[in-house]
Image (cartoon, grey):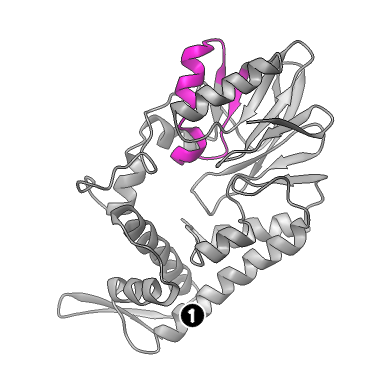
Amino acid sequence: MELTKLRGRTYYIQAPTNVGVYRYKNGLCALIDTGLDNTTGRKLLETLEENGLKVKYILNTHAHPDHFGADNFIKENQPASIIGASPLEKVFMENSNMENIILYGAAPMPGLSTRVLKAKDTAADIELTEGFVELGDKKFEIVPLEGHTIGQIGIVTEDGVIFCGDAFFSEDKMEKYPLPFVFDVGAHLKTLEFLLESNYDCYVISHCDGPVENPKSLIQKNIDNINENLGLITDILSQPQTREDLTELIIKKYDIPMNISQYFITITSVSAFLTFLLEKQSISMDIIDGKMYFYV
């Protein structure tokens, strides 16, 4: 891992989940997200130590394990660090099995609670709400970026760098996962429109090689991807389908590799698209002979 400067005192560490780093003048730093697990956390601390830094704050964009899974390891090794999250994401971090409960709709079935979907319960010390928050002698702006999750936030440093979490995805990720994981399609589109009209100096997303070079173009491609999926689902529903049948057709259409976790991630995203289309009255729903059908 390597500490790379973005602007001013704002840096990042490229990793499977990129980690933001804001350097204070006294050798302390704030992290934005931490990655999946203890192994990642250990590598992060080694990189920070090589650069003379200790962790004071850990600011989480959202409560998916690949973003907060190393929080506990870092805090155990640097007990003075303070963990922050939005009020809603804080609930999920402190009760990490809730993500699997939402995916499955009940106590999770065996095989669902993998480390990708369930981290160790993590207590957040402070809540990060919309607006400016003073952390030490610096201010960070907290920006709501809901949609991918129920309470995702963006974190903006004084250098004009916004760490967006999973508010939008790289072209490589959209090619690999054409149906993105979205909790609320309407909120996700509002977030994308907000980011499209924003004017931050630098945009960092979690799963991308470096800062986004052409953010507006990439954000528009994410909007187009959502609209293409809405069109695809609407076309499929010209013939009535159950949610499970629709999910099967999308899996086959996109050739999505399947395991238990990926199946429930996919069907949850399909559910979010169905909710959006029902709210827009673009489709209808009926229960016939014990099955729920969706159709145009």
Left or right: where 120 falls relative to 276:
left
Which quadrant, please, contains the C terminus? bottom left
- Image height of 4 relative to 204, above or below: above
**In the image as oriented, which residue stretches furthest toward the bottom?**
238
Q: Position of residue 188 (x, y in %)?
A: 57, 58
- Residue nearest the observer in this picture, 32 or 156: 32
Quadrant in which the N terminus appears: top right
Magenta residues, start to end: 56-82
Q: Position of residue 16 (x, y in %)?
A: 55, 42
Magenta segment includes 77: yes
As for residue 71 lying within the magenta part, the answer is yes
Residue type of the residue flagged with mark 1: Leu
Q: Quadrant of residue 260?
A: bottom left
Residue indicated by mark 1: 232
Along the viewing direction, whichever of 190 and 199 lies nearer the viewer: 199
The residue lying at 67 percent from left, 47 percent from top is 209
Residue 168: x and y in percent read: 62, 55
* Residue 126, visible in the rendered structure: no
Q: Seen in the image, is 244 located left or right of residue 25?
A: left
Residue closer to the observer: 257 or 76: 257
Q: Which residue appears at 33% of the width and 50% of the height?
A: 102
Q: Residue at x 71, y 22 (%)?
A: 134
Q: Is residue 8 above or below residue 16?
A: above
Q: Image quadrant of residue 139?
A: top right
